[in-house]
Image (tube, rainbow, N blue to C red):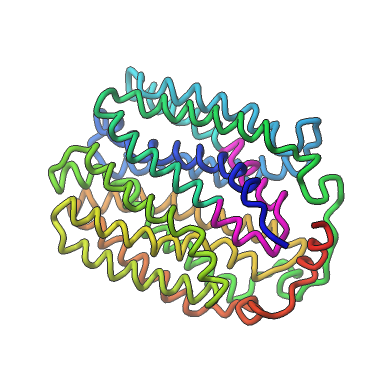
Amino acid sequence: MKLNYKKTLLLGFGFLSISLTWALYNSFVPIFLRKFIVSNGVIGFIMTLDNYAGLFLQPIFGTLSDRTRTRFGRRIPYLLIGMPIAALFLCIIPWHWSLISLVFLIVCLNLDMASFRSPTIALMPDLTPGPLRSKANGVINLMGGLGSVIAYFIGSKLYSVNKAYPFYMAAVFMLISLAVLYKNIKERRDALNYDDVPVKIEEKKEDSSGKLSKNVVFLLIAIFFWFVAFNPVEAFFTLYGKYFLNVNEAVAASKLTYFSLSMMIFAVPAGIIATKIGKKKTIITGLILMILLFSAILNANDINTIGYIFIFAGFCWALININSYPLVVSMTTGSNIGKFTGFYYIFSALAAIVSPPVAGALIDIFGYDILFKISLVGFILALIFISLVKPPAENNIKGKASIEDSLENLDV
């Protein structure tokens, strides 16, 4: 059984447009807000609105799409409605005329994006057999990384010409991605068991009882902390470059290109490495290297040096991020996979809600040089908790497949 790379790459267009949009949003919306708001803590809070929307609305729309049956499929209808609306708001946001108008447009964009993100993400497991999902996740994240690279590299140059141009670019990519998905993905034809009710498979008591084992709790806490470490850098690095390193915000945003490009290049290799040495060991390796690299940034006051460090950091983040979701679902089987997927997104969303305003408040008190110190603390705590995890799947990397995987193999 082999992964259909062409189909997976086409699926990745949805994640590409979403990643491109959020990369631009995180880079330039804080600049818009800074014209009206002095406090970084308040800016950080506003920048978390997408995660509040995701925390409450994504599970709802994901569940709704599970139950949806139309001639267009289960997930595609949500994209057909949500993506054009998102493109419209992206075009309007740069032309805000007051703080109230800017916040209103931000809220509208966040609510709309939450309506189709879960259905977009769900397309991958819908169309991909269980044993191939880790590799497919690497391909999907490669496309997401490409979206971020486009946002940081081309978007920063467009911003220098006109502040609205990067958002126009995001809108165009959103519509192109929708066209690609609509033309090439036919859910009734391509989805595994499209019309079937999921088969219940006998599971371990700790999975079927609804209670979380210590392993799962430790893993979710680790996920929370490594996103706590990463999110403030993504949210505040443009301002860090402008006010601490005294460089143009477009230059600072362009350096994030190095990070995203590196992660994109190593997305698939990160998944392959995990199949060789195990997901937990791969993640721990990434965390240790991130701690070393971010420690080096504390002594680097030159934007170019930080850019070079970001090249290696992108590889390390790929080791962590590409394997985090597959590690979560490896700790359960069958009917609980959806529930554990929900746990993953809840903890990552909580981190995205908590970390930017807290980091912003700490920056207000101590200055921008605390930014990477915050990240170091997060990565160290994540390393401690992931070290406590004993995932059962790690012992079966070369062993026999799960019952679910065996059943899915019959459909290929």
Q: Nearer the viewer, residue 350 or 315?
A: 315
Tell me, yes or no, if residue 230 can be seen here: yes
Image quadrant for the C terminus?
bottom right
Q: Residue 65, how many percent across, how many down? A: 72, 40
Q: Nearer the viewer, residue 303 or 387?
A: 303
* Residue lying at 34% horizontally and 43% vertically, measured from the top left: 44
Image quadrant for the N terminus?
bottom right
Q: Nearer the viewer, residue 145 or 361?
A: 145
Q: Quadrant of residue 366?
A: bottom left
Q: Residue 400, how many percent across, how many down? A: 74, 78
Q: Is residue 75 left or right of residue 141?
A: right
Residue range corresponding to the magenta coloring:
114-139
Q: Quadrant of residue 94?
A: top left
Q: Residue 57, how many percent across, how many down? A: 60, 41
User: Is the residue 250 above or below the residue 407 in the image?
Assistant: above
Say how many tags the image has: 0
User: Is the residue 219 above or below the residue 24 in the image?
Assistant: below
User: Would you say residue 124 sits in the magenta stretch?
Assistant: yes
Q: Residue 13, how many percent across, how many down? A: 56, 40
User: Would you say residue 133 sits in the magenta stretch?
Assistant: yes
* Residue lying at 22% horizontally and 36% vertically, measured from the top left: 38
Q: Is residue 245 left or right of residue 196?
A: left
* Residue lying at 44% horizontally and 39% vertically, measured from the top left: 20
Magenta span dominant secondary structure: helix
Tell me, yes or no, if residue 46 can be seen here: no
